Amino acid sequence: MNNVVGKMLIVMQLVFSVLFMCFAGAVYTFQGQWRTKARDLQGIVDEQSLQIDDAVAARNREKMDLEATLETAETDRDNYRAQLQAAENQATQDQALLAAAALERDKALADSEVATAEAAARIVEANALNKEVRSQQLRISALVSDIQGVENDLLDKTGKLASAVEIEEQHLSELGRLKDLLRLNDIDPGQMVVGAVPAQVEKVDGKIRGTRRNKARTAELAEISIGSDDKVYANQLLTVYRKDKYICTARVVEVYPDVAICLVIEKTRQGNIQEGDDVTTKL
Amino acid sequence: MSPPNSDPTVYDGLMFVSLAAVIVGIVFLVMTLGQYGWTGP
Protein backbone atom coordinates (compact mmCIF):
# COMPACT_ATOMS: atom_id res chain seq x y z
CA MET A 1 0.00 0.00 0.00
CA ASN A 2 2.84 2.39 0.87
CA ASN A 3 4.52 1.74 -2.43
CA VAL A 4 1.39 2.67 -4.32
CA VAL A 5 1.11 6.02 -2.53
CA GLY A 6 4.81 6.73 -3.03
CA LYS A 7 4.57 5.92 -6.67
CA MET A 8 1.58 8.22 -7.10
CA LEU A 9 3.42 11.02 -5.28
CA ILE A 10 6.47 10.51 -7.48
CA VAL A 11 4.35 10.69 -10.64
CA MET A 12 2.57 13.79 -9.41
CA GLN A 13 5.90 15.38 -8.47
CA LEU A 14 7.15 14.66 -11.94
CA VAL A 15 4.07 16.13 -13.54
CA PHE A 16 4.22 19.33 -11.45
CA SER A 17 8.00 19.66 -11.97
CA VAL A 18 7.53 19.45 -15.71
CA LEU A 19 4.70 21.98 -15.53
CA PHE A 20 6.92 24.28 -13.41
CA MET A 21 9.70 23.99 -15.99
CA CYS A 22 7.28 24.71 -18.84
CA PHE A 23 5.79 27.76 -17.17
CA ALA A 24 9.30 29.08 -16.26
CA GLY A 25 10.40 28.64 -19.87
CA ALA A 26 7.26 30.38 -21.12
CA VAL A 27 7.87 33.27 -18.74
CA TYR A 28 11.46 33.59 -19.87
CA THR A 29 10.37 33.41 -23.50
CA PHE A 30 7.57 36.05 -23.39
CA GLN A 31 8.93 38.41 -20.72
CA GLY A 32 10.75 40.55 -23.37
CA GLN A 33 7.52 41.26 -25.21
CA TRP A 34 5.79 41.95 -21.93
CA ARG A 35 8.59 44.28 -20.90
CA THR A 36 8.44 46.18 -24.20
CA LYS A 37 4.73 46.45 -23.91
CA ALA A 38 5.05 47.55 -20.31
CA ARG A 39 7.59 50.23 -21.30
CA ASP A 40 5.30 51.43 -24.05
CA LEU A 41 2.45 51.55 -21.64
CA GLN A 42 4.66 53.33 -19.12
CA GLY A 43 5.57 55.92 -21.79
CA ILE A 44 1.93 56.39 -22.59
CA VAL A 45 1.20 56.68 -18.90
CA ASP A 46 4.03 59.25 -18.50
CA GLU A 47 2.79 61.23 -21.50
CA GLN A 48 -0.72 61.10 -20.17
CA SER A 49 0.63 62.20 -16.78
CA LEU A 50 2.42 65.14 -18.42
CA GLN A 51 -0.71 66.03 -20.33
CA ILE A 52 -2.65 65.75 -17.13
CA ASP A 53 -0.11 67.97 -15.38
CA ASP A 54 -0.30 70.51 -18.20
CA ALA A 55 -4.05 70.36 -18.14
CA VAL A 56 -4.04 70.80 -14.40
CA ALA A 57 -1.67 73.77 -14.72
CA ALA A 58 -3.82 75.27 -17.47
CA ARG A 59 -6.87 74.63 -15.38
CA ASN A 60 -5.19 76.34 -12.44
CA ARG A 61 -4.24 79.31 -14.61
CA GLU A 62 -7.74 79.49 -16.01
CA LYS A 63 -9.06 79.16 -12.53
CA MET A 64 -6.88 82.04 -11.37
CA ASP A 65 -7.92 84.06 -14.37
CA LEU A 66 -11.53 83.23 -13.77
CA GLU A 67 -11.12 84.10 -10.13
CA ALA A 68 -9.57 87.44 -11.09
CA THR A 69 -12.34 87.98 -13.62
CA LEU A 70 -14.86 86.98 -11.04
CA GLU A 71 -13.35 89.39 -8.57
CA THR A 72 -13.40 92.16 -11.18
CA ALA A 73 -16.95 91.26 -12.10
CA GLU A 74 -17.92 91.31 -8.44
CA THR A 75 -16.27 94.70 -8.07
CA ASP A 76 -18.08 95.94 -11.16
CA ARG A 77 -21.28 94.41 -9.84
CA ASP A 78 -20.82 96.24 -6.56
CA ASN A 79 -20.09 99.46 -8.43
CA TYR A 80 -23.11 98.98 -10.64
CA ARG A 81 -25.21 98.24 -7.61
CA ALA A 82 -23.95 101.44 -6.03
CA GLN A 83 -24.62 103.35 -9.27
CA LEU A 84 -28.02 101.73 -9.50
CA GLN A 85 -28.75 102.74 -5.95
CA ALA A 86 -27.56 106.27 -6.68
CA ALA A 87 -29.62 106.31 -9.88
CA GLU A 88 -32.64 105.13 -7.96
CA ASN A 89 -32.08 107.87 -5.41
CA GLN A 90 -31.61 110.37 -8.22
CA ALA A 91 -34.74 109.08 -9.90
CA THR A 92 -36.65 109.52 -6.67
CA GLN A 93 -35.36 113.07 -6.37
CA ASP A 94 -36.10 113.70 -10.04
CA GLN A 95 -39.62 112.42 -9.59
CA ALA A 96 -40.04 114.82 -6.71
CA LEU A 97 -38.59 117.61 -8.82
CA LEU A 98 -40.82 116.54 -11.70
CA ALA A 99 -43.85 116.79 -9.51
CA ALA A 100 -42.76 120.23 -8.34
CA ALA A 101 -42.02 121.21 -11.95
CA ALA A 102 -45.44 120.00 -13.00
CA LEU A 103 -46.98 122.23 -10.37
CA GLU A 104 -44.87 125.14 -11.53
CA ARG A 105 -45.73 124.30 -15.15
CA ASP A 106 -49.44 124.44 -14.37
CA LYS A 107 -48.93 127.71 -12.62
CA ALA A 108 -46.82 129.00 -15.50
CA LEU A 109 -49.47 127.88 -17.99
CA ALA A 110 -52.08 129.84 -16.09
CA ASP A 111 -49.73 132.84 -16.00
CA SER A 112 -48.92 132.40 -19.68
CA GLU A 113 -52.60 132.46 -20.59
CA VAL A 114 -52.94 135.72 -18.75
CA ALA A 115 -49.74 136.96 -20.37
CA THR A 116 -50.98 135.85 -23.80
CA ALA A 117 -54.10 137.90 -23.41
CA GLU A 118 -52.02 140.82 -22.26
CA ALA A 119 -49.56 140.27 -25.14
CA ALA A 120 -52.41 140.38 -27.64
CA ALA A 121 -53.37 143.75 -26.27
CA ARG A 122 -49.72 144.81 -26.39
CA ILE A 123 -49.48 143.63 -30.00
CA VAL A 124 -52.42 145.79 -30.98
CA GLU A 125 -50.83 148.67 -29.16
CA ALA A 126 -47.44 147.90 -30.74
CA ASN A 127 -48.96 147.88 -34.22
CA ALA A 128 -50.39 151.30 -33.61
CA LEU A 129 -47.04 152.47 -32.28
CA ASN A 130 -45.27 150.94 -35.29
CA LYS A 131 -47.49 152.92 -37.62
CA GLU A 132 -46.73 156.05 -35.70
CA VAL A 133 -43.02 155.16 -35.68
CA ARG A 134 -43.08 154.69 -39.46
CA SER A 135 -44.70 158.08 -39.93
CA GLN A 136 -42.16 159.59 -37.55
CA GLN A 137 -39.36 157.84 -39.44
CA LEU A 138 -40.58 159.28 -42.70
CA ARG A 139 -40.72 162.68 -41.09
CA ILE A 140 -37.24 162.15 -39.63
CA SER A 141 -35.95 161.12 -43.05
CA ALA A 142 -37.36 164.27 -44.57
CA LEU A 143 -35.88 166.36 -41.76
CA VAL A 144 -32.56 164.59 -42.15
CA SER A 145 -32.54 165.33 -45.86
CA ASP A 146 -33.40 168.95 -45.05
CA ILE A 147 -30.60 169.03 -42.49
CA GLN A 148 -28.20 167.58 -45.05
CA GLY A 149 -29.24 170.25 -47.55
CA VAL A 150 -28.77 172.94 -44.92
CA GLU A 151 -25.41 171.47 -43.97
CA ASN A 152 -24.37 171.40 -47.62
CA ASP A 153 -25.41 175.04 -47.98
CA LEU A 154 -23.60 175.83 -44.76
CA LEU A 155 -20.47 174.13 -46.05
CA ASP A 156 -20.70 176.02 -49.34
CA LYS A 157 -21.22 179.30 -47.55
CA THR A 158 -18.46 178.50 -45.11
CA GLY A 159 -16.14 177.86 -48.05
CA LYS A 160 -17.27 181.06 -49.71
CA LEU A 161 -16.81 182.91 -46.44
CA ALA A 162 -13.30 181.53 -46.09
CA SER A 163 -12.54 182.55 -49.67
CA ALA A 164 -14.06 186.00 -49.04
CA VAL A 165 -12.01 186.39 -45.88
CA GLU A 166 -8.88 185.44 -47.80
CA ILE A 167 -9.77 187.88 -50.59
CA GLU A 168 -10.51 190.54 -48.00
CA GLU A 169 -7.12 190.02 -46.45
CA GLN A 170 -5.52 190.26 -49.88
CA HIS A 171 -7.47 193.45 -50.56
CA LEU A 172 -6.52 194.94 -47.21
CA SER A 173 -2.91 194.07 -47.91
CA GLU A 174 -3.18 195.62 -51.37
CA LEU A 175 -4.94 198.66 -49.88
CA GLY A 176 -2.15 199.11 -47.36
CA ARG A 177 0.42 198.79 -50.12
CA LEU A 178 -1.45 201.38 -52.26
CA LYS A 179 -1.74 203.77 -49.32
CA ASP A 180 1.97 203.42 -48.70
CA LEU A 181 2.58 204.03 -52.38
CA LEU A 182 0.39 207.17 -52.26
CA ARG A 183 2.28 208.47 -49.24
CA LEU A 184 5.58 207.91 -51.02
CA ASN A 185 4.23 209.97 -53.93
CA ASP A 186 3.10 212.75 -51.56
CA ILE A 187 -0.62 212.00 -52.12
CA ASP A 188 -3.00 212.04 -49.25
CA PRO A 189 -4.79 208.64 -49.13
CA GLY A 190 -7.83 210.39 -47.63
CA GLN A 191 -8.16 212.85 -50.49
CA MET A 192 -11.54 212.89 -52.26
CA VAL A 193 -11.63 211.60 -55.86
CA VAL A 194 -12.86 214.24 -58.32
CA GLY A 195 -14.21 213.35 -61.78
CA ALA A 196 -14.71 210.04 -63.55
CA VAL A 197 -12.20 207.38 -62.87
CA PRO A 198 -11.23 205.28 -65.88
CA ALA A 199 -11.75 201.61 -65.56
CA GLN A 200 -8.83 199.43 -64.79
CA VAL A 201 -6.92 198.60 -67.85
CA GLU A 202 -6.09 194.93 -68.20
CA LYS A 203 -3.52 193.73 -70.67
CA VAL A 204 -5.26 192.29 -73.72
CA ASP A 205 -3.48 191.44 -76.96
CA GLY A 206 -5.10 191.30 -80.40
CA LYS A 207 -4.45 191.57 -84.13
CA ILE A 208 -5.28 194.10 -86.85
CA ARG A 209 -7.82 192.52 -89.15
CA GLY A 210 -8.05 195.34 -91.63
CA THR A 211 -7.84 199.11 -92.15
CA ARG A 212 -9.83 201.66 -94.04
CA ARG A 213 -9.34 205.34 -94.67
CA ASN A 214 -12.02 208.00 -95.27
CA LYS A 215 -12.41 209.62 -98.63
CA ALA A 216 -10.33 212.61 -97.68
CA ARG A 217 -7.71 210.23 -96.34
CA THR A 218 -7.42 212.29 -93.21
CA ALA A 219 -8.41 209.54 -90.81
CA GLU A 220 -7.84 205.77 -90.71
CA LEU A 221 -10.08 203.17 -89.05
CA ALA A 222 -8.75 199.76 -87.99
CA GLU A 223 -10.66 196.60 -87.13
CA ILE A 224 -9.13 194.61 -84.28
CA SER A 225 -9.77 191.01 -83.10
CA ILE A 226 -10.72 191.87 -79.50
CA GLY A 227 -14.00 193.33 -78.20
CA SER A 228 -16.19 193.81 -75.16
CA ASP A 229 -15.74 190.15 -74.19
CA ASP A 230 -12.06 190.99 -73.69
CA LYS A 231 -13.01 194.05 -71.53
CA VAL A 232 -12.28 196.52 -74.29
CA TYR A 233 -14.40 199.64 -73.86
CA ALA A 234 -15.11 202.75 -75.90
CA ASN A 235 -12.52 205.58 -75.96
CA GLN A 236 -9.89 203.19 -74.72
CA LEU A 237 -6.43 203.85 -76.08
CA LEU A 238 -4.67 200.92 -77.75
CA THR A 239 -1.10 200.62 -78.93
CA VAL A 240 -0.36 199.21 -82.38
CA TYR A 241 3.09 197.73 -82.96
CA ARG A 242 4.87 195.28 -85.18
CA LYS A 243 7.47 193.19 -83.43
CA ASP A 244 9.68 195.75 -81.65
CA LYS A 245 8.51 198.69 -83.71
CA TYR A 246 5.93 201.15 -82.37
CA ILE A 247 3.49 202.20 -85.09
CA CYS A 248 0.76 204.34 -83.56
CA THR A 249 -1.90 204.74 -80.89
CA ALA A 250 -5.62 204.19 -81.68
CA ARG A 251 -8.79 205.09 -79.87
CA VAL A 252 -11.70 202.65 -79.69
CA VAL A 253 -14.78 204.16 -81.29
CA GLU A 254 -17.13 201.14 -81.53
CA VAL A 255 -17.14 197.98 -79.51
CA TYR A 256 -18.69 194.62 -80.34
CA PRO A 257 -18.43 191.40 -78.34
CA ASP A 258 -15.40 190.09 -80.26
CA VAL A 259 -14.55 192.95 -82.58
CA ALA A 260 -13.78 196.64 -82.11
CA ILE A 261 -13.24 199.58 -84.46
CA CYS A 262 -10.36 201.97 -83.64
CA LEU A 263 -9.51 205.39 -84.92
CA VAL A 264 -5.83 205.99 -85.45
CA ILE A 265 -4.50 209.09 -83.71
CA GLU A 266 -2.50 210.66 -86.48
CA LYS A 267 -0.28 212.60 -84.12
CA THR A 268 1.15 209.34 -82.82
CA ARG A 269 1.64 207.68 -86.18
CA GLN A 270 5.15 206.50 -86.89
CA GLY A 271 4.36 204.08 -89.70
CA ASN A 272 1.64 202.44 -91.79
CA ILE A 273 -0.71 199.95 -90.24
CA GLN A 274 -0.86 196.58 -91.93
CA GLU A 275 -3.14 193.58 -91.49
CA GLY A 276 -1.69 191.25 -88.88
CA ASP A 277 -0.03 193.94 -86.79
CA ASP A 278 -0.21 193.47 -83.05
CA VAL A 279 -2.46 195.56 -80.84
CA THR A 280 -2.47 195.68 -77.02
CA THR A 281 -4.17 197.57 -74.26
CA LYS A 282 -1.04 197.82 -72.13
CA LEU A 283 2.60 197.44 -73.04
CA MET B 1 14.42 -11.69 7.19
CA SER B 2 15.44 -10.78 3.65
CA PRO B 3 17.74 -7.76 2.85
CA PRO B 4 16.10 -4.68 1.39
CA ASN B 5 16.09 -4.40 -2.39
CA SER B 6 18.54 -1.54 -3.35
CA ASP B 7 18.20 -1.76 -7.14
CA PRO B 8 17.03 1.59 -8.68
CA THR B 9 13.62 1.41 -10.15
CA VAL B 10 11.88 3.47 -12.82
CA TYR B 11 10.51 5.69 -10.07
CA ASP B 12 14.02 6.61 -9.05
CA GLY B 13 14.62 7.74 -12.65
CA LEU B 14 11.42 9.72 -12.56
CA MET B 15 12.65 11.40 -9.38
CA PHE B 16 15.85 12.46 -11.18
CA VAL B 17 13.87 13.67 -14.16
CA SER B 18 11.69 15.66 -11.78
CA LEU B 19 14.79 17.11 -10.11
CA ALA B 20 16.21 18.11 -13.48
CA ALA B 21 12.93 19.76 -14.42
CA VAL B 22 12.87 21.75 -11.18
CA ILE B 23 16.52 22.86 -11.74
CA VAL B 24 15.76 23.92 -15.31
CA GLY B 25 12.73 25.84 -14.08
CA ILE B 26 14.81 27.58 -11.43
CA VAL B 27 17.41 28.53 -14.05
CA PHE B 28 14.66 30.03 -16.22
CA LEU B 29 13.37 32.10 -13.31
CA VAL B 30 16.88 33.30 -12.39
CA MET B 31 17.48 34.35 -16.01
CA THR B 32 14.16 36.11 -16.07
CA LEU B 33 15.00 37.97 -12.84
CA GLY B 34 18.37 38.88 -14.38
CA GLN B 35 16.52 40.71 -17.12
CA TYR B 36 15.06 42.98 -14.39
CA GLY B 37 18.35 43.68 -12.69
CA TRP B 38 18.24 41.02 -10.06
CA THR B 39 21.83 40.17 -9.02
CA GLY B 40 21.16 37.46 -6.55
CA PRO B 41 20.95 37.16 -2.79
Image (cartoon, rainbow, N blue to C red):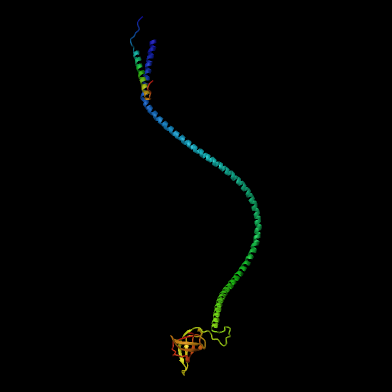
Tell me: A240 left or right of B9: right
**Residue at left offset 49%, top offset 37%:** A64
Provide residue A60's location: percent of width, then percent of height.
Answer: 48, 35
Q: Which residue sits furthest top?
A: B1
Q: Is A208 placed above or below B11 here?
A: below
The quadrant holding residue B32 is top left
Provide residue A36's location: percent of width, then percent of height.
Answer: 37, 28
Tell me: A94 left or right of A236: right
**The C terminus of chain B, quarter of image:** top left
**The N terminus of chain B, quarter of image:** top left
Provide residue A240's location: percent of width, then percent of height.
Answer: 46, 87
Q: Nearer the viewer, residue A143 or A110?
A: A143
Q: Is A10 placed above or below A55 here?
A: above
Q: Nearer the viewer, residue A218 or A7?
A: A218
Q: Nearer the viewer, residue A27 or A66?
A: A66
User: Is any atom of residue A100 visible in this view?
Assistant: yes
User: Is any atom of residue A277 visible in this view?
Assistant: no
Q: Is A16 placed above or below A77 here?
A: above
Provide residue A176's location: percent of width, then percent of height.
Answer: 55, 80
**Residue at left offset 62%, top offset 47%:** A93
Q: Is A242 placed above or below A124 here?
A: below
The quadrant holding residue A153 is bottom right
